[in-house]
Image (cartoon, grey):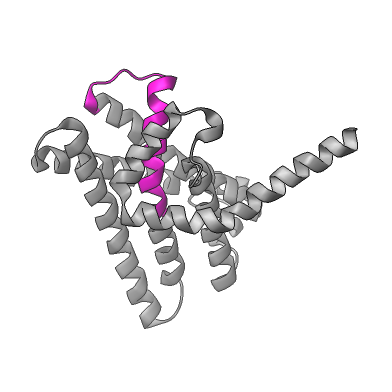
Amino acid sequence: MPFLVFLKSFEDLLYELMSWLVFYPRTLWRSVRHPLEMMARGEQELKEPPQEQFNDLLSPPIFLLLTILLAHGFELALIGNSDLIDKDGGLASLISDNTSLILFRIVMFASLPIVVGAFSLWTLGRPLDRTTLQPVFYAQCFVTTPEFLFYSIAGTLSRLENDWAKLGSAVLLLAGTVFYFGVQAAWFKRELKRGWGIGVACAGAVFVITILLLAFSALLFAGD
């Protein structure tokens, strides 16, 4: 009997993992094509029973996690190991291999939607607790993940000694910034039911918070 239970669990796990081959590109495409709709779904789906949530998509945290893993794999295939692994200064000494680097990136980039989500609740005048923060965190994952993918690929391309790669890096960096800023502005405009001026101002604050978090992380892990 325990063996049959194990087989059933393995069967469910295998199906779930293989289903990501279908639902990851769908989730990515919809997040880029219809970001506001996806942010709304990120909030609304949590009201459904757990077994009915995100039936045709990846859940936002899994979506972010897989994107970090894929971006890391792209970096390994194109460049090799990150320079951060070989650095000794600061907290970089804690990163000794690709596993620890992936864990660091998961923590760093998952902190963006949680911090921005908390700021969003404050801006919207909503209470901050575990119940109210989770839907906003899920919504923010859908806009943070494409931004991370743009920036990550741009960072990898920038390390290539090729003019076209560097141009592509600049284009992706600009595209990621415009996408993230524009979606945040539209989202705050919709949620606050105010004009574009307020939406742009809130998006600007979110963008500054994002840059400060990334800069702070970079300083902590700066090596010699």
**Nearer the observer, 123 or 38:** 38
User: Where does residue 98 sit, x and y in percent of width and height?
Assistant: 63, 55
Viewport quadrant of the N terminus: top right
At x 34%, y 66%, the residue is 172
User: Where does residue 201 sit, x and y in percent of width and height?
Assistant: 15, 40
Q: Is residue 84 visible?
A: no
Residue 129 among those drawn in magenta = yes
User: Where does residue 183 sit, x and y in percent of width and height?
Assistant: 25, 48
Q: Is residue 211 visible?
A: yes
Question: What predominant SS class does the magenta segment belong to?
Answer: helix
**Nearer the observer, 56 or 123:** 56
On screen, residue 103 versus residue 203, left or right, reads right
At x 61%, y 45%, the residue is 94
User: Where does residue 144 sit, x and y in percent of width and height?
Assistant: 38, 47
At x 27%, y 63%, the residue is 174
Q: Please state the total of marks drawn on the protein image.
A: 0
On screen, residue 167 versus residue 48, left or right, reads left
Residue range highlighted in magenta? 123-148
Relative to 224, is 191 above or below?
above
At x 42%, y 34%, the residue is 45
**Nearer the observer, 186 or 33:** 33
